[in-house]
Amino acid sequence: MAVTSTRSSYQVTFTVLLLGTIAYSLLQSLVSPVLPTIQHDLHTTQNTVTWVLTAFLLSASIFTPILGRVGDMVGKERMLVVTLAALAAGSVVAGLAHSITVLIIARAIQGIGGAVLPLSFGIVRDEFPGVKVAGAVGIIAAMAAVGGGAGIVLAGPIVSHLNYHWLFWIPLMIAVIATLCAWLFVPESPLRTPGRVSWLAAVLLSGWLVALLLGVSEAPSWGWGSPKVLGLVALAAVLAVAWVWVELRAVEPLVDMHMMRRRAVWTNNLVAFMFGIGMYSVIGFLPEFVQTPTSTGYGFGASIIQSGLFLLPLTVTMFIGGLLSGRLAATIGSKSAVIIGSTASTGAYLLLAFAHSEKWEIYLASTLLGVGLGLAFSAMSNLIVQAVPPAQTGVASGMNANIRTIGGAIGAAVMSSIVASEILRDGYPAESDYTRGFFFLAVMTVVAVVAALLIPRGPGAGADPDLAHHLEHAELAVVPGGSIAEY
């Protein structure tokens, strides 16, 4: 796809990949603090506006494995251009949207950009000198985490001085530049893997996710016992079973279920799923909670800028926790780091559920949650790598991240259903709804703790073998985004 006749410098390629990562990570988080503003301006309900977040996550969950497989077949740089172009196109539609339906469609188009990370990791593996791969992947993944945190903080100033449409125009500029540069400067993939996409598996994966999310999100208005909700949940279950059956029998599965059955893999994926439920729900609903007027009897009447600052400790400590995770895992083992991270996250959600009347309590919970997420995500990556052959490292690690996204999509829908179950006269949820919602997240992380306890311990009951040596030569290989050097 690149028009250059010779292979571009890997430093140039690295810059392009960073631009694409920044554009995607900003779009992932920018809208979260301003969902109440979008809800008001587009005259919709809290339950519906949550689909602005859910549609993005759902789309990313579906397209990431598909485009990753196509990239292996036709060239990673070709699919990187397609992915970034979709990110830009979705941003144009979102920037012009004046109805909630159009905005949700635009966010689904943007979600295609979720493939930018696995494609970037694959390009790094193909193009960079071996000694540079670890640091490059670590920096890209770290930039994804930093960009996501920056989006939460920048959303307030952008909306205050411009309007929420600029939440899409600004990333659009970055996405357009990244698309053009990827087309011009990223060399064609030297490695191709002949094969085909299991489109039946892709359709079944899409079907059960959509059916489940639609049923859960509409349950408050339709009724949990209504035929529509029960029918959608039953349909989701049938399609999910069919999806697993097809994947198990496929010569070239979209998701390798045989690999997924390994104890070290499925336990870490279960932890990732539960963490995704909690993380994306907090990013979506904690800003709404702190922005609630004090006249309702709870909340802090925070501005959009102030609500972003409530989540700033989460971003900072997640990054720090991710870096510390490697050294901690080298001492006590990655399994112990996951257990500690899961336990810390449980404590954070319990704080949000039962101690949220003072600002310092929110800041404390945000800090504790960031530490927990950072420790667990990075340690899970090490455990996944130890559990699979080198040739499957990228696939296994990418699927772990994608399962976290699926958990986020489902969690956001369930959290919306809980929070929207009782609306006050002034249009805000009852405080008890938020309490139940945050407690639900705590229960999910308790499940993560149990799953972490089931993770098999590596050779030796203590520290992970060779991990300290690995970190000595690639400190950035373990980062809060959950990605590692061995991609």
Image (cartoon, rainbow, N blue to C red):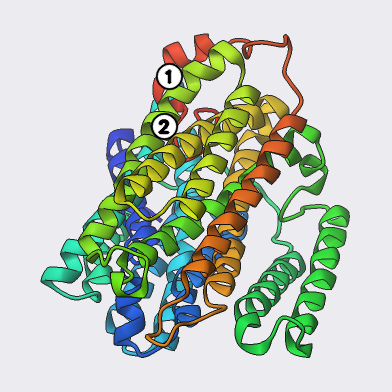
* Rendering coords of residue 212 (x, y %): 69, 73
Mark 1, Cα crowd under 10 Å, few <14 / some 14-19 / many 20+, is some
Find residue 461 and report its image quarter.
Answer: top right
Label 2 belongs to which residue? 138
Q: Which amino acid does label 2 sit on?
A: Gly
Q: Is residue 348 visible?
A: yes
* Rendering coords of residue 96 (x, y %): 28, 84
Query: Which of the numbered marks, if any, corresponds to residue 474?
Result: 1
Is 347 in front, or is 48?
347
Asked which secondary structure carries label 2, the reply is helix
Asked which secondary structure carries label 1, the reply is loop
Please say if 381 is above or below 97: above
Relative side of 160 to 385, left or right: left
Q: Residue at x 72, y 52 (%)?
A: 255
* Rendering coords of residue 396 (x, y %): 66, 40
Q: Are marks 2 and 1 in contact (CB under 8 Å)?
A: yes
Is 240 in front, or is 19?
240
Quadrant (top left/top right/bottom left/bottom right) for the N terminus: bottom left
Q: Residue at x 29, y 34 (%)?
A: 11
Please say if 35 is above or below 19: below
Q: Residue at x 81, y 69 (%)?
A: 237
